[in-house]
Image (cartoon, rainbow, N blue to C red):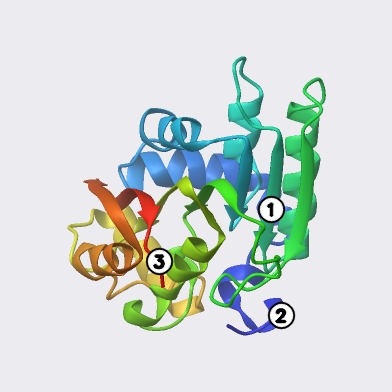
Amino acid sequence: MPPPRDNAGAAAYTPWVLYLYDWLVLYVTNTFAWKCSTAADLLPLFESTLQAKHLEIGVGTGYFPAKALGRPGSRCKQITLVDLNPSSLAAAKTRISAAAATQSIKVDTVVADAMEPLPFAPSDKFDSITMFYLIHCIPGPLEHKNRVFAVARRQMAPDGVLAGATVLGRSRPMNWLAGILMNTHNRLGIFDNWDDTEEILCRGLRENFEDVTVWVVGRSMLFRATRPRER
C-alpha cells in the first residue's frame, strides 16, 4: 500500500476531517446511507470483542475503544493502535487515553501498513483485534485486500478473537445518499469497494480462521472470527 501521502483512504483523515468524523460518519452516514447503526450494531460488537491485550487496525478517531473503556467492567489493560496516518493515531491516542485515565491502560501507536506483516516480535500476540471500516478504504481488488486477515491471524493469540465491519460494494442495494457517497468516495480514492462482496470476504476469513461468523446490516458486513489457522 502506498505511504499516507499517496493513499487517499489514509490521507483523507486530516485533523479537520477527524474533528467532524464522529458526526458525519458514525451518525449521519451509518444511519442514513449504510443503514448500520453505530450504537446498536457496531459498538456492541466492539465491546464484546475487547480483551486484555488489544490491537486496533485502522483507528479513525478512536471512537470505539474510547466508548468501550469509558464504561465500567472493561477487561482491557493494553491497546496498540496501528494506522498509516499519524494524525489519526495522535487523535485516537489522545481520546482513548482520556477515556481510560482512571484505569492505567497503556496505549501505544504504530505507523504501519495493514497489508504487510506488522512490526511486532513473533511472540507478541494479541487477545483481541479489530478492524472497523478499514477494508473498504484499502485500494486494490478484494482478493488482494483479504491479506489483512492473514496479517491479523499472525498477530492473534490462539484463543483470541478478530472482529470488524466494512461497507460492501454494488452487490448491495443503496439509496440515493449511499449512491452519492459511494460514487464520490470511489472516484476520489477514499473508498475502493465497488466490487467488494460478502462471498469473497468470507473466503478470506475462512482461509485464516476456523470459526467465522458473518452477518450483513444494511450495506455493511460485520464479522467475528476465532481459532486462527496454523500456517
* Whether residue 219 is situated above or below residue 115 in the rendered picture: above
Residue 149 drawn at (x, y percent):
43, 66
Q: Earlier in the sequence, mark 1 or mark 3?
A: 1
One can see residue 219 in this view? no
At label 2, which amino acid type do we have? Arg
Residue marked by disc 3 = 230
- For label 2, the crowd category at 10 Å Cα-Cα, with few meaning under 14, some 14 to 19 and many 20 or more, is few
Residue 173 drawn at (x, y percent):
17, 57
Q: Tag 2, which secondary structure?
A: helix
Residue at image coords 44%, 31%:
48
Residue marked by disc 1 = 81
C-alpha span from label 2 to label 3: 35 Å
The N terminus is located in which quarter? bottom right
Residue 66 drawn at (x, y percent):
66, 33
> Is residue 76 rendered to the left or right of residue 105?
left
At label 3, which amino acid type do we have? Glu
Residue at image coords 32%, 80%:
143
C-alpha span from label 2 to label 1: 19 Å
Q: Earlier in the sequence, mark 2 or mark 3?
A: 2
Residue at image coords 60%, 26%:
75
